[in-house]
């Protein structure tokens, strides 16, 4: 595969990571804790879409290789993830009388409950959406780019959602309130913003985007109860790289981490070509920069960023 | 001590949750006893469970000396546990890649296969890993520490999974000897003990054979490990060192203002906790006789966390209690499956763990058995010189009072 091919794959994977990391970052800045259940919220979105798509089928025509029914399923997946998150907030997080560390630990319990329920209902095996697998787009293959129309659909939908969020944040009343709350919750409250309501909307938007990310992840790979949890740390890496609490930072961090993840084979090729001495070091580097360690590389980057620049690329709460 | 000399007074002195825990524990013990005598629960398997509970208690002791003492959110328990387990397994197992590599080295090869060497190696590797993980993460804010340590634990798991030449990859390691292999008396103890046949209830005899004696040895081993760790930790907790750690937990800036090098104290607490976790791993290796990359799964970390927050952070007896609850959840779900439920035990276990976490945080965030009077030597209260009813006052202020 060529560099262009890796970049194209990176773009698709990045779109999914970006959708996941925006929500994590929003909740981090407004509800003020690291939500370990975020990955499993993605899983819920994906499975809700799976059930819907199975029930309604294709519904006639198709866009970008995806039947209309799939887009209905996507909307249902987004709605389901948002509904579950809001329900959890109302039922569990809100009545809690603990600090942000207590909330973090609680969210681990919530993550287990989500995943266990999905696993009880659907089993632990891998499944797929019932869509026709596509061949790579012919005109791009000569450049070494092997992407399908589905991948284009993923990137396109992610762009639409991200632009929509940008418009919401910058040009609507709710967006202004959210930014104010992320900046300084106390000040926001005394200036008359109904912070509870804004917090609920944050959950809706964050979890909804996570649900969309989960659906696309299911389309990109497969569905499994562990799919979201496996991605959680990668998403954390993206959010930390971008700067916790900053939505635009999360977008940038998600983009970078997704790219790095998919470009790992390319990097290992680069390392192979470099004249590194002594030989054992070259061998060690080569074996460490391989596709098996793609996630590990993201985690190491995350720790490095925390050490060097704990506020990330965009800095704290610069929404 | 006080419970022996004055059992009635000790009973009356219990807080209500303590009374509940005691009552439930006694009932649970009776239930187990009945199950044992009727043959519903094999004695060998029962001892295996006791060993497992002891191992989880060790793991929670380790986590307790990080989270409970110093307030460090360490989500890399599984990594230290796995490193202890793998360290010992790689040195002692017959089919270990490391053993094959070192087979021709003169002095070293004669040391391979000795579990005590495995113990030392496991702890040494954990020590190095604790320093390596501690240096970058211990300066971080609490929630960053949680995320970073979980990430680094995943890196360790990925290395164990992928470096086949060193760890045998996803196949794991078999052919591990029991911990007492090669010891003078202990190694042959299970074979030399006679097979016993107890018939408490006519028609369902309970057989005690070699496997039983082997399991008994394992239980003794874990009791020795856990007992030693418990005594050391209790002493450390009350020492000036432990006091500094508690200060760091409640107000790190204050500790720094008092002139303490908080980073160094946190590192010490982190290393000690990690060594205890690795000790649990070493024991697990020789109990289970197989280790695989699955043992480094994050779920092991969260089992230990549930045990600690359930028992009450900072409380060692709470950790013990939490360890027993975890084994009950882990192994009890297997029984549930045998009985009736058409549900796979794995998600059920996950669900229970999740529900326990949420319920504890919702209804009793300080845990069921929070430490009491943790800032004072008990002798200062129990013995002379103290006012008449000091512990009541202290308890009420600690929020663990009798009316709760």
Image (spheres, coloured by chain):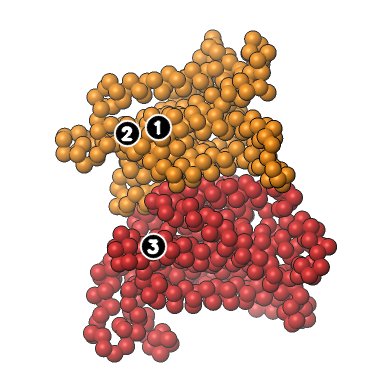
Chain colours: A orange, B red
Task: Judge whether B9 appears above or below B214 on screen.
Answer: below
Q: Which residue is mark 1?
A: A249
Crowd tier of the residue under label 2, counting other residues whose Cα lies within 10 Å: few below 14, some 14–19, many 20 or above: some
Mark whose residue sits in front, 3 or 2: 3
Task: Work out whether residue B98 or residue A173 is closer to the camera in this orientation and state it.
Answer: B98
**Quadrant housing the N terminus of chain A:** top right
Residue A11: quarter of image: top right
> Label 2 lies in what chain?
A
Report the side of B18 relative to B134 (left or right). left
> Residue A40: image x %, image y %?
48, 39
Task: Work out whether residue A271 or residue B169 is closer to the camera in this orientation and state it.
Answer: A271
Residue A9: quarter of image: top right
> Label 3 lies in what chain?
B
Q: Are marks 3 and 2 in contact (CB under 8 Å)?
A: no
- Label 2 SS: loop
Task: Work out whether residue B346 or residue A184 is closer to the camera in this orientation and state it.
Answer: A184
Q: Which mark is residue B262?
A: 3
Mark found first going from the N terminus, 1 or 2: 1
Q: Which mark is residue A318?
A: 2
Q: Are marks 1 and 3 in contact (CB under 8 Å)?
A: no
């Amino acid at each position: 595969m060529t560099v262009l091919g890796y970049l194209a794959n990176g773009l698709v994977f990045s779109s999914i990571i970006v959708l996941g990391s925006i929500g994590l970052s929003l909740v981090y800045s407004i509800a003020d804790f690291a939500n370990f259940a975020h990955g499993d919220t993605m899983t819920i979105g994906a499975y809700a879409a799976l059930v819907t798509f199975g029930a309604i089928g294709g519904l006639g025509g198709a866009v970008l290789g995806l039947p209309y029914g799939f887009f209905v399923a996507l909307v249902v997946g987004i709605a389901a993830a948002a509904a579950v998150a809001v329900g959890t907030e109302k039922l569990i997080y809100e009545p809690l009388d603990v600090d942000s560390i207590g909330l973090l630990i609680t969210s681990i319990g919530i993550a287990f409950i989500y995943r266990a329920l999905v696993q009880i209902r659907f089993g632990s095996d891998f499944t797929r959406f019932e869509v026709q697998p596509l061949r790579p787009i012919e005109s791009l293959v000569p450049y070494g780019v092997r992407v399908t129309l589905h991948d284009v659909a993923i990137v396109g939908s992610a762009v639409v959602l991200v632009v929509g969020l940008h418009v919401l944040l910058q040009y609507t009343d709710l967006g202004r309130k959210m930014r104010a709350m992320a900046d300084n919750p106390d000040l926001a409250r005394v200036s008359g913003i109904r912070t509870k309501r804004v917090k609920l909307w944050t959950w809706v938007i964050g979890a909804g985007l996570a649900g969309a990310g989960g659906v696309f992840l299911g389309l990109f790979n497969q569905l499994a109860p562990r799919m979201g949890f496996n991605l959680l740390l990668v998403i954390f890496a993206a959010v930390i790289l971008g700067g916790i609490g900053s939505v635009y930072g999360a977008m940038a961090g998600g983009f970078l981490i997704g790219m790095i993840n998919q470009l790992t084979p390319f990097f290992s090729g680069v390392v192979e070509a470099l004249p590194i001495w002594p030989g054992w070091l070259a061998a060690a580097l080569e074996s460490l920069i391989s596709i098996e360690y793609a996630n590990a590389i993201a985690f190491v980057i995350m720790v490095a960023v925390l050490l060097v620049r704990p506020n990330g690329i965009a800095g704290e709460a610069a929404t | 001590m006080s419970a022996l000399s004055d059992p009635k007074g000790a009973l009356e002195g219990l807080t209500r949750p303590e009374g509940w825990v005691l009552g439930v524990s006694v009932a649970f013990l009776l239930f187990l006893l009945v199950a044992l005598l009727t043959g519903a629960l094999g004695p060998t398997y029962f001892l295996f469970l006791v060993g497992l509970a002891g191992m989880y208690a060790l793991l929670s002791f380790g986590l307790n000396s990080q989270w409970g003492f110093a307030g460090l959110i360490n989500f890399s328990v599984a990594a230290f546990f796995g490193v202890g387990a793998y360290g010992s397994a790689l040195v002692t197992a017959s089919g270990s890649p490391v053993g094959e590599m070192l087979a021709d080295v003169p002095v070293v090869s004669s040391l391979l296969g000795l579990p005590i060497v495995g113990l030392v190696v496991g702890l040494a590797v954990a020590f190095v890993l604790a320093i390596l993980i501690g240096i970058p993460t211990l300066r971080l804010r609490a929630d960053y520490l949680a995320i970073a340590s979980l990430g680094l634990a995943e890196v360790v798991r990925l290395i164990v999974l992928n470096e086949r030449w060193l760890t045998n990859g996803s196949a794991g390691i078999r052919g591990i000897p029991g911990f007492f292999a090669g010891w003078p008396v202990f190694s042959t103890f299970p074979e030399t003990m006679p097979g016993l046949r107890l018939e408490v209830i006519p028609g369902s005899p309970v057989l005690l054979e070699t496997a039983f004696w082997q399991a008994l040895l394992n239980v003794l081993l874990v009791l020795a490990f856990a007992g030693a760790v418990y005594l050391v930790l209790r002493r450390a907790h009350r020492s000036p060192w432990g006091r500094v750690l508690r200060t760091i937990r409640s107000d790190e800036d204050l500790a720094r203002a008092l002139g303490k090098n908080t980073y160094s104290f946190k590192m010490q607490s982190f290393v000690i906790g990690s060594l205890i976790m690795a000790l649990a791993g070493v024991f697990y290796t020789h109990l289970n006789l197989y280790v695989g990359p699955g043992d480094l799964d994050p779920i092991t970390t969260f089992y230990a966390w549930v045990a600690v927050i359930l028992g009450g952070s900072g409380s060692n007896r709470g950790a013990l209690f939490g360890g027993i609850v975890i084994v009950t959840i882990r192994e009890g779900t297997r029984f549930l499956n045998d009985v009736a439920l058409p549900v796979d035990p794995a998600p059920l276990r996950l669900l229970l763990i999740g529900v326990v976490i949420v319920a504890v945080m919702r209804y009793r965030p300080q845990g069921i058995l929070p430490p009491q009077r943790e800032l004072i030597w008990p002798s200062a209260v129990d013995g002379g010189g103290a006012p008449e009813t000091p512990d009541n006052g202290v308890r009420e202020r600690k929020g663990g009072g009798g009316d709760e």
